Image (cartoon, helix red, strand yellow):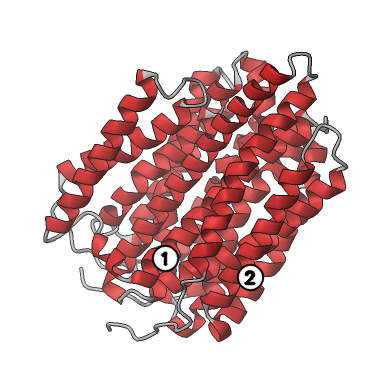
């Protein structure tokens, strides 16, 4: 099969892929708002419940690197069909609400579908739109990647309060079904199928590496670092990742071409994207718990309170995309991280069991105002550095690290939240539950603020020049 790079109607094709990715990424955090309900329904503690989010991200982190290989073996249509069918099956299974194990399995199956769809979306968008239009399109892609997880708690808050949490999955399943029926005919094959040799050892090393690393981070919420359950998978994961990287550099046809990291602006852009996703996902698991557990709002109200922050993102993303083509990434990233730091400083100084809720809403809006300026420009600037033949590898490497960031952000946030509560209880044994919970959330925000500072320092090194020469 030869290279077929013409999409009949690129806009509708991009829309279908983005909608599919949006539903999957919405699923990433939609259950955050329902964690307290799920914990009550199945009588499980927070560290167990958080596996619904961490497990989802764990599967994404394992699958996304393999996707670069799959895109060279299967046509765009085959991958999209497979991704939507698997996602539909997972959502339907989770919706049955039988017990915690079935719910978790449904989540993991849905994650497999999302893990296939995300890299395909990014790669297809890079192929079907010319460089000069890419800022606007990537602005919309950035909107999907950041809004879906951020808006998850808001939409699901309303669904939980009106229908019950299992309807999060029924609605997702219905949307997947609609996409299959209406959307699939509009998908054309645009990727080149080269059928490279499948290296089983690379797949194994990447699975053990990413899996072990994230499993260890997530287990830290329940176990101390000295526990075998934490340090053993962490060490095994790190060794496997090092071996994976060494193997990729030596192979003629690597699973992920790590040579993309030889482009310095690609590496820096990926790092900034990584930190931004870390901030988005750790915030999106902590704030719903804080609004419900410490400030005692219902799921629906808590969801609505997070809406202005998400609205900022929706309004800003296409705007930043348009202006990016004019100004490049540097100014956006620096300004963005200044706002992210301000937002986090407000959280750090105001979070308590008696905080006026408007302060939290304003801080969240400032945070997202900044994050919208950092994510898309960093991602587009990074991918624009690469020659065309490295797009699939670049987007696979970046997507993999984004999923690792999401899983790590969620796991670290819950771990720090738990240890912050424990520390507060030692000093104030008679404290009320809302005060304990607020103290845990506040403690986790020290970490998020630190990450923001690192991002700001990184943004200072972005070069103004935007490389658009391509290897055609």
- Quadrant of the drawing holding the C terminus: bottom left
Q: Which residue is drawn at 28% across and 53% down?
A: 70
Q: Residue at x 68, y 42 (%)?
A: 153
**Alpha-carbon neighbours of circle 2 within 10 Å: few (<14), some, or many (≥20)?**
some
**Alpha-carbon neighbours of circle 1 within 10 Å: few (<14), some, or many (≥20)?**
many
Q: Position of residue 408 (x, y in %)?
A: 47, 41
Q: Residue under label 1, please give it.
A: 268
Image vertical order of residue 145 relative to residue 113, above or below? below
Would you say 93 lies left or right of 124 here?
Answer: right
- Examine the image and state in which quarter residue 430 appears: top right
Q: Where is residue 463 in the image (x, y as percent from the top left)?
A: 45, 78
Image vertical order of residue 236 relative to residue 470, above or below? above
Label 1 SS? helix
Label 2 SS? helix
> Closer to the camera, 325 or 420?
420
- Examine the image and state in which quarter residue 204 appears: top left
Q: Residue at x 65, y 64 (%)?
A: 338
Q: Position of residue 235 (x, y in %)?
A: 29, 32
Q: Residue 335 has which mark?
A: 2
Q: Residue 352 has which mark?
A: none
Image vertical order of residue 176 relative to residue 321, above or below? above
Would you say 344 lies left or right of 108 here?
Answer: right
- Quadrant of the drawing holding the N terminus: bottom left
Image vertical order of residue 188 relative to residue 428, above or below? below
Q: Can residue 319 be seen in this view?
A: yes
Would you say 350 lies left or right of 314 here?
Answer: right
Mark 1 or mark 2: whose residue is earlier in sequence: 1
Would you say 30 lies left or right of 67 here?
Answer: right
Q: Which residue is drawn at 29% across and 49% down?
A: 66
What is the C-alpha distance between the residues marked 1 and 2? 16 Å
């Amino acid at each position: 099969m030869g290279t077929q790079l013409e999409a009949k109607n690129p806009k509708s094709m991009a829309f279908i892929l983005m909608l599919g990715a949006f539903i999957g990424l919405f699923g990433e955090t939609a259950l955050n708002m329902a964690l307290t309900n799920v914990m009550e329904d199945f009588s499980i503690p927070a560290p167990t419940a958080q596996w619904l989010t961490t497990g989802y991200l764990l599967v994404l982190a394992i699958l996304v690197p393999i996707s670069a290989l799959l895109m060279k073996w299967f046509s765009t249509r085959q991958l999209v069909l497979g991704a939507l069918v698997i996602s539909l099956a997972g959502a339907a299974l989770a919706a049955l609400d039988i017990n915690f194990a079935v719910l978790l399995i449904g989540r993991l199956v849905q994650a497999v579908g999302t893990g296939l769809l995300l890299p395909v979306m990014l790669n297809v968008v890079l192929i079907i739109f010319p460089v000069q239009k890419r800022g606007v399109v990537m602005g919309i892609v950035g909107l999907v990647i950041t809004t879906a997880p951020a808006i998850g708690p808001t939409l699901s808050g309303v669904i939980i309060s009106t229908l019950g949490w299992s309807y999060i999955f029924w609605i997702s399943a219905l949307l997947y079904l609609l996409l299959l029926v209406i959307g699939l005919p509009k998908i054309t094959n645009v990727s080149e199928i080269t059928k490279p040799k499948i290296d089983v050892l690379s797949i194994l090393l990447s699975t053990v590496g990413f899996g072990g690393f994230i499993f260890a981070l997530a287990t830290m919420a329940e176990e101390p670092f000295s526990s075998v359950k934490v340090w053993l998978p962490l060490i095994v994961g790190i060794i496997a990742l090092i071996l994976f990287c060494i193997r990729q550099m030596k192979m003629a046809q690597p699973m992920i071409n790590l040579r993309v990291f030889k482009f310095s602006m690609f590496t820096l852009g990926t790092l900034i994207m990584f930190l931004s996703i870390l901030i988005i996902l750790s915030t999106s698991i902590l704030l719903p718990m804080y609004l419900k557990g410490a400030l005692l709002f219902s799921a629906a109200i808590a969801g609505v309170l997070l809406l202005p922050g998400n609205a900022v993102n929706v309004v800003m993303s296409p705007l930043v995309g348009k202006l990016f083509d004019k100004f490049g990434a540097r100014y956006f990233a620096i300004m963005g991280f200044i706002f992210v730091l301000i937002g986090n400083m407000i959280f750090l100084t105001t979070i308590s069991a008696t905080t006026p809720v408007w302060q939290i809403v304003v801080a969240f809006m400032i945070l997202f105002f900044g994050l919208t300026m950092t994510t898309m420009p960093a991602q587009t600037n990074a991918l624009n550095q690469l020659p065309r033949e490295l797009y699939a590898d670049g987007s696979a490497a970046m997507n993999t690290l984004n999923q690792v960031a999401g899983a790590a952000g969620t796991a670290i946030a819950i771990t720090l939240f738990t240890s912050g509560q424990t520390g507060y209880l030692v000093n104030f044994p008679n404290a009320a539950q809302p005060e304990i919970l607020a103290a845990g959330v506040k403690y986790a925000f020290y970490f998020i603020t630190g990450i923001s500072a690192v991002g700001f320092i990184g943004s200072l090194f972005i070069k103004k020049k935007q490389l658009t020469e391509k290897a055609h």
